[in-house]
Structures are given as structure tokens and as C-alpha cells.
Image: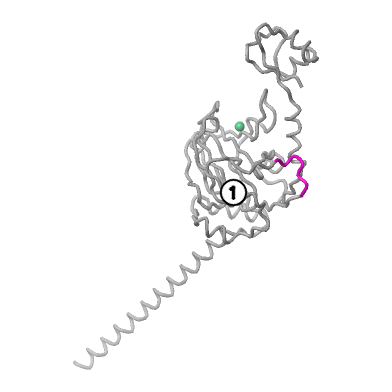
Amino acid sequence: MHNSFIKTLILILILASVTTADAFSLRKRVSVTATKEIITASLPEPLPFNAVLTDSIVKINTLKIIIPISDYLRLIDFSEMPEEYDIWSDTKINPYQVNLVDMKDTVKIDMSSFYSPVQSYVTSNFGFRRWRHHYGIDLKVHRGDSVYNAFDGVVRITKRARDYGYYVLVRHFNGLETLYAHLNKITVNPGDTLKAGIPVGLGGNTGRSTGYHLHFEVRYLGNPINPNDIIDFNSFTLKNQILVLNAQHFEYKKEIEKIRFWTVRSGDTLGRISQRTGISIARLCALNGIKRTSILRIGQRLRYT
Ligand SMILES: [Zn+2]
């Protein structure tokens, strides 16, 4: 009787120790996996493009790792980041004051983590509109569609502005910055570390916008790049895995500088503006998309170069 009681007690003790050991090793395994995942998120391994895309699709809506900025700074190889990026503003889109029109260097940018922000048709392209340049590309969205972060990086700005509406700007580890505007809702905060393919918000029509669309910009040191130079918006894939960035990407700025406008004053007619500027009426009409019979408004800006 006494003997069997001791046997039972020993058995219970053995069972208990085995269970604890199991639990301990399980905990250990979990924590090792978690650490590995965080490091992967901070330092994306360059992989074949298709593999990365598949990876991102699998992880969509499941992975949102937030690392404090200090940790992220510690993990990044800064030799590849321009020193102007020491500036970190959570209010200004372009706080760097660098004009890249006459950029001397060639910068190689790792594009491997790319994920398309949305997959729909272009409604307005990068380039000239009547009297202002369009620094991004517009893509159709429906209210509430997810808008995805394009490359691994850290959220720099989340804000509401008069023109952009609700917008998010992300600084990417590869040196590019991307901007997502007219959102219905923002779902990230400044300082969040995001993998490519993590939603930054929902598609909307906020700010100076007519109809639901995403206004998407790609910038380097604050200078916009034509998104068509790097992304094929028919297949929503990259044109190249490595972007070789040089002065050519900013040539469009020279065209902007060349353009002059005439502000319509009281008594102005197309004939008089033609005389003053030396540009024919036909050319003025073509440049501004108007007819000879169009009525001019005082204060209206007419392009004449
Ligand atoms: Zn736009």
C-alpha cells in the first residue's frame, strides 16, 4: 500500500517534468522563429522577383511587424543611403532641398521587394496637365479597396492635406520614397516598419480629387520619378529589378522650367496675347486646349511655350 503510493508519486513527478520540458522547448522554438522573422523584415534578402511576389501574396494581411525606428536604423547599411536621409520629417514631403536635374552620380537601387500598390487601370498619367505638372500616376480604385505598400520600409508621414486628402508617405530601405494619396482611411502610423504588400490604407476620394482613385508617387531624395520608368502598369510588375537612377530620370524638370504662362488681364484677347508673346493664335489654342472663340477669364493662365 505504502509502496504503491510512492510509485504513483514518482510517476506523477516524471510526467510533470516531461511536460515542463516540452513547454520550455516549445517556447524556445517560438521565440527563435519570431526573432528570425523580425530580422527578415528589416533586411530584405534580394531574391528572384517572382519568389518575392509570391511570398508577399502569402503574407498579405497576416504580417505587420512594427520595429522602433532606432532598431531599424541600427540594422540598415547606411553607406548606400544618401546623407540627406539623415533628415526625418513627419510633416514635409520633400524636406531635402536637393535638385537632381544635373545629378552626376548613378545610383543603384534594389527593387526586389516590390509589390504593386493596386492592380487596376491608369486614369491619369505622370506628366503635363494644362498648367501644372502631375507628379504621380492615378490608378482606379473603388471605395475601400486595399492600397498596398510598394517596397519594404518605414512610414514617415500620415496626414490629411487639402490637395492630397488623406495620404501616406513611406521611406523605403532601398532609398526610394512612395506616396499614396486621396485615401479613404489610413491604416498605419508614422514609424511603422512595413513589408511590401502590407496595406497602408483604403482607396478613397479625399482632397482635390474627382472620383475614387489612388494618386501614387515615387520619389528619390524628394524628387519625383515617373512611375512608368520603373513599373509596367499593364502587368503590375517591375521593368527592372535594379533601378539605375541617373540625371535622365529628372530630364522632365527641364521641360517644366521652359514653360511660360500668360495671366489674362482685363481687355486681353487671343490676338493681343499672340502679339505680346510672339506665339500664333493657332499655337496658343493647341497648347491650352481652347478654341479661337473661347472666352478668356481674367486671371486665367495660358501656356505660351
Ligand atoms: Zn494624381
Q: Is residue 195 left or right of residue 232?
A: left
Q: Which residues are magenta?
A: 99-105
- Indicate the position of residue 118 as horizontal and vertical percent values: 58, 41
In magenta segment, residue 216: no
Quick one: 125 or 280, which is closer to the camera? 280
- Corner quadrant of residue 210: top right
- Corner quadrant of residue 119: top right
Q: Please name the residue that numbered disc 1 is placed on.
A: 87
Q: Is residue 110 left or right of residue 42?
A: right
Q: Which coloring applies here?
A: one colour
Q: Residue at x 52, y 45 (%)?
A: 199
- Indicate the position of residue 43 as horizontal and vertical percent values: 60, 59
Amino acid on which the number 1 mark rests in the picture: Ile
Residue 187 versus residue 38 in the image, above or below: above
User: Image quadrant for the C terminus?
Assistant: top right
In magenta segment, residue 102: yes
Residue 70 versus residue 277 in the image, above or below: below
Residue 303 versus residue 196 in the image, above or below: above
Query: From this viewpoint, which residue is outermost toward the left?
Result: 1
User: Image quadrant for the N terminus?
Assistant: bottom left
Magenta portion: prevailing SS class: loop
- Indicate the position of residue 304 as horizontal and vertical percent values: 75, 19
**Disc 1, ligand 1: is the CB inside 8 Å?**
no
The quarter of the rendering in which ligand 1 is drawn is top right
Quick one: 264 or 217, which is closer to the camera? 264
- Corner quadrant of residue 281: top right
